[in-house]
Amino acid sequence: MKILSDKMKDKSKRIKVSFFHSYTLIFILYYLLFSTTGCAQEMEDINVQICNSKFQLAVDEKLSAQPINEVIVEIGKSFIGTDYAAHTLEVNDQEKLVINLSALDCNTFVENVLVLSRCIKQDKTSFDDYQDELKLIRYRDGKIDQYPSRLHYFTDWIFNNEEKGIVKNITKEIGGEKLEMNLSFMSSHPEYYKHLKAQPEFIPVIKKHEEEINKREHFFIPQEKIAELELQIESCDLLVFTSTIKGLDVNHVGIAVRMDDDRIHVLHAPNVGYKVQISELPLAEYVNKIEKDSGVIVVRVLEPTE
């Protein structure tokens, strides 16, 4: 009887332990769910606050009445001091509209300044308006359709947004030279891209986009010609730094700002460990210091039309 009693006690203990473990597991799962949801909500609240602060700045400075180039420069300068963050768009397993206004890389800095400025000029200043405009600019034809629909290569971003009437590539008309394009980096190095590693079926789609981009005509201003053509670059033009790295088109992007020295400088999110800033060196000298930059593409932002 004692043996039976001990077995029953042991079984009872195992049931209690099992119940305790199950309860603990459920508690952890709930904690992770709600803490993740809480973090996401907190991030959205921060983005809404920053977005609204830019729209309020526009009201205070009466920016909507100014030309788009002045709006872009003022909104761009308002981000000075913002932290740089790499891979800001690679946070979800599935492609979604990612917003992070509190930390920017060079692409998201330029995109967000352009988006906010266009919203201000169009008097569309709700957070929903901002999200709609961001989706329009970031994605091929403004539609999110899995990872390949994002405009990954900046030369493709220029082409697609030129078709939308948002920007104009003026590189050729201000004296740019022909640039041979042989894009292959993403399809050749999928291991560098979270989504391509997880979903290799997207690699042929990316490769097809690369082939389409390679067939287009491309122009750039070589390093040695930037100084002589600098006067034709205006404040608020987008500066796109062409790459010497095999298979890549662009290393970096920024916004042109004419400073008190009457030279064009670069307003940009430079790199890890730095904050959004204006380059100390003028554009020509800045590009000449960077070995992997072969020159620049110059893109003019157009006034929004209804």
Image (spheres, grey):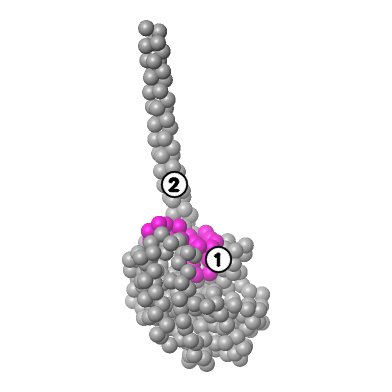
Query: Which of the pair 295/304 is nearer the observer?
Result: 295
Lower sequence index among marks 1 and 2: 2
* The quarter of the displayed image where residue 120 is located: bottom left
Residue beneath the point at 44% across and 54% down: 44
**Secondary structure found at label 2:** helix
Q: In the image, residue 133 lies at what x, y percent?
A: 38, 68
User: Considering the numbered disc 1 on the image, is that residue within a helix, a strand or a loop?
Assistant: loop
User: Is residue 173 visible to the viewer in this orientation of the structure?
Assistant: yes
Residue 10, compared with residue 191, is above or below; it is above
Q: Is residue 86 magenta?
A: yes
Seen in the image, is 226 located left or right of residue 49? right
The residue closer to the viewer here, 243 or 64, is 243
Q: Which mark is residue 79?
A: 1
Dominant secondary structure of the magenta stretch?
A: loop
Which numbered disc covers residue 37? none
Label 2: how many Cα within 10 Å (few below 14, some 14–19, many 20+): few
Identity of the residue drawn at 41% across and 13% down? 6
Q: Are marks 1 and 2 in contact (CB under 8 Å)?
A: no
Residue 164 occupies quadrant: bottom left
Amino acid at the residue labelled 2: Thr
Quarter assignment of residue 140: bottom left
In the rendering, which numbered label is found on residue 36?
2
Quadrant (top left/top right/bottom left/bottom right) for the N terminus: top left
Q: Quadrant of the C terminus?
A: bottom left
Picture residue at 59% right of the left edge, 67% below the top: 271
Badge 1: residue crowd in 10 Å (few <14, some 14–19, many ≥20): many
Q: Which residues are magenta?
A: 85-108
